[in-house]
Image (cartoon, rainbow, N blue to C red):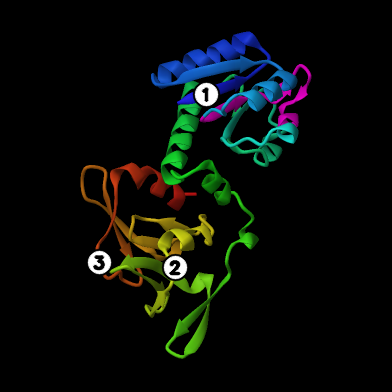
Amino acid sequence: MKILLIEDELPAAERLSASLLQLRENLRLLAILPTVKESIQWLKTHPHPDLIFMDIELTDGQSFLIFDEVKLDCPVIFCTAYDDYWQKAFEYNSIDYLLKPIAREKLLASLQKYEQLKAHFSHSFEQFQQFRKNPDQYKKRWLIKRGSDYIALKTEEIAFFYATHKMVCLVDTDGQKYLLDKSLSDIERELNPAQFFRLNRQFLAHINAIKKLKSIGKGKLSVELDPASPEEVLISAEHTAAFKEWLDA
């Protein structure tokens, strides 16, 4: 994991980097940058890291100014002695907000949160940013052809989608099935990820359709849907943590 520290207090930066290396041996610290100006220059001339730990109050201004000059393609964990900016921070790629002095267990929880989000949004950070979109920007209605007729379904009337035999079916909350001429990946991009989760390659379900979970060993989960799914729905061990966090959000 490649990380960047934006911090103007060298002792604080050294403590943070030491703690991170203790928690994750595969971590690589790219640089410690003390000012807004140096951060902008570095980010404009280097590939972006996997994750940035960023203080807010720097010697030449607030680190939010960095975002006016650079489009970051990675998530940020803000680390600050002030609790005044937590709401504003989540407008700027933030996935967590840590107050100094940073407790080891809080830092570990932040790293785990990043890793879980990365596992869930594995295609790109762009997909992670979709997660933070305004819900109004997602698809609200679906016009579906059935024979010679068209049916309009509200998104909240959808229980789940599943792929079978090179086709994709939509199942509504009453258990009615409709064929769609789209891939699951295309459908996923049109849905609010706070409401829908890609359970595996075949199933994409609304949170209200999740009826029961059952551990089946080796970290895997079996998911019971309502209405019932046409076949068993399994979640792999690598996606279990992200799925549980999504359900518990």
Q: Which residue sits at x=59%, y=32%?
A: 76
Q: Which residue is mark 1?
A: 3
Q: Which residue sits at x=43%, y=35%?
A: 115
**Place of residue 61 in the rendered image (x, y in percent of width and height, measured from the top left):** 78, 23
Dots 3, 2 in contact, CB < 8 A: no
Residue 68 appears in view: yes
- Say above or below: 20 vs 163: above
Q: Residue furthest bottom?
A: 148
- Say above or below: 147 vs 2: below
Residue 82 belongs to the span the image colors magenta: no
Dot 2 or dot 1, earlier in sequence: 1
Q: Which residue is mark 3?
A: 231
Q: Which residue sits at x=65%, y=21%?
A: 42
Q: Nearer the viewer, mark 3 or mark 2?
A: 2
Residue 126, picture quadrant? top right
Q: Which residues are magenta?
A: 50-66
